[in-house]
Image: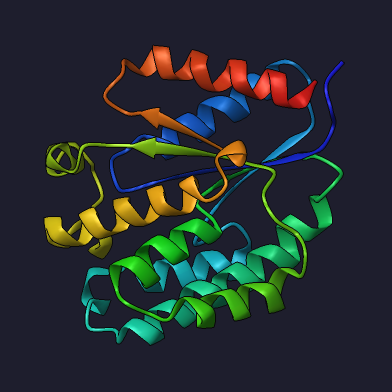
């Protein structure tokens, strides 16, 4: 017997495998008839997906970092109200990116004040937080080769290596502050190995 509610997030830099592994997990949970819902950030709800489309267009690369952050947080608010809050404590929620991505990219990567991001996140979500996070760790030197295999490239795939290093270090700092709520997955492992590691951990979490 498994729990019928839990909030799991996949985090990591571009090309780390978080999206494919989050979708793989959803597929496995559904095969076990476990009620679950998949979300992504930015995006998820109808309006949040509109914001996502606008945010990630290559021609919008001139955004001020604060404008960028506010748009991401606006998308989160829409996603939270329409998708996360209604399913919280009712289904297994699997989210591709969440709060940690905003801190890693906008705070550690772009220098937006952490207290500003934390304040708005709290206004949006109150006390609701993810129960567990998988951090997909990728050697930054492998990032460009992985991104080059993508069919669609967005503006966040085109930053300098130094930016992704700051973001990656940001993720690790966040993780190290609350290790019991995180598992770091080495993206250099074979895909199938990481699939098994993730699913075995989730099974334990849901019992």
Q: Quadrant of residue 150?
A: top left
Q: Is residue 141 visible?
A: yes
Q: Residue at x 49, y 62 (%)?
A: 42
Q: In the rendered view, does 149 fall on the left or right side of 42? A: left
Residue situated in front as seen by the camera: 87 or 186: 186
Q: In the rendered view, does 109 fall on the left or right side of 67? A: left
* Quadrant into which the C terminus falls: top right
In x, y percent, where is residue 169?
31, 52
Q: Residue at x 47, y 54 (%)?
A: 174
In x, y percent, where is residue 155?
24, 64
* Quadrant into which the N terminus falls: top right
Figure colour scheme? rainbow
In x, y percent, where is residue 129?
70, 55
> Total label count?
0
Q: In the rendered view, does 16 fall on the left or right side of 97? A: left
Q: Is residue 73 above or below residue 91?
A: below
Q: Is residue 150 above or below residue 162?
A: above
Residue that protrudes farthest toward the front in the picture: 177
Q: Residue at x 71, y 26 (%)?
A: 205
Q: Is residue 30 visible?
A: no
Q: Quadrant of residue 93?
A: top right
Residue situated in front as seen by the camera: 77 or 121: 121
Residue situated in front as seen by the camera: 147 or 159: 159
Q: Is residue 18 above or below residue 118?
A: above
In x, y percent, where is residue 145?
12, 37
Q: In the rendered view, does 124 fall on the left or right side of 139? A: right
Q: Residue at x 31, y 51 (%)?
A: 168
């Amino acid at each position: 017997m498994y729990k019928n509610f839990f909030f799991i997030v996949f985090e990591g830099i571009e090309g780390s495998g978080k999206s494919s592994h989050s979708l793989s997990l959803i597929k496995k949970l559904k095969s076990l008839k476990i009620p679950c819902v998949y979300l992504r950030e930015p995006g998820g709800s109808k309006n949040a997906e509109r914001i996502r489309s606008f945010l990630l267009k290559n021609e919008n690369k001139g955004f001020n970092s604060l404008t960028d952050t506010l748009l991401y947080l606006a998308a989160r608010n829409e996603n939270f109200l329409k998708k996360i809050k209604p399913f919280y404590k009712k289904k297994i929620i699997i989210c591709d990116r969440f709060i940690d991505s905003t801190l890693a990219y906008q705070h550690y990567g772009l220098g937006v004040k952490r207290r500003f991001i934390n304040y708005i996140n709290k206004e949006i979500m109150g006390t609701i937080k993810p129960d567990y996070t998988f951090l997909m760790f990728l050697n930054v030197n492998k990032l460009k080769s992985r991104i080059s295999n993508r069919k669609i490239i967005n503006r966040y795939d085109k930053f300098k290596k130094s930016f992704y290093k700051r973001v990656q270090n940001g993720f690790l700092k966040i993780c190290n502050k609350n290790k019991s709520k995180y598992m770091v997955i080495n993206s250099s492992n074979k895909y199938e190995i990481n699939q098994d590691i993730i699913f075995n951990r989730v099974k334990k979490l849901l019992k």
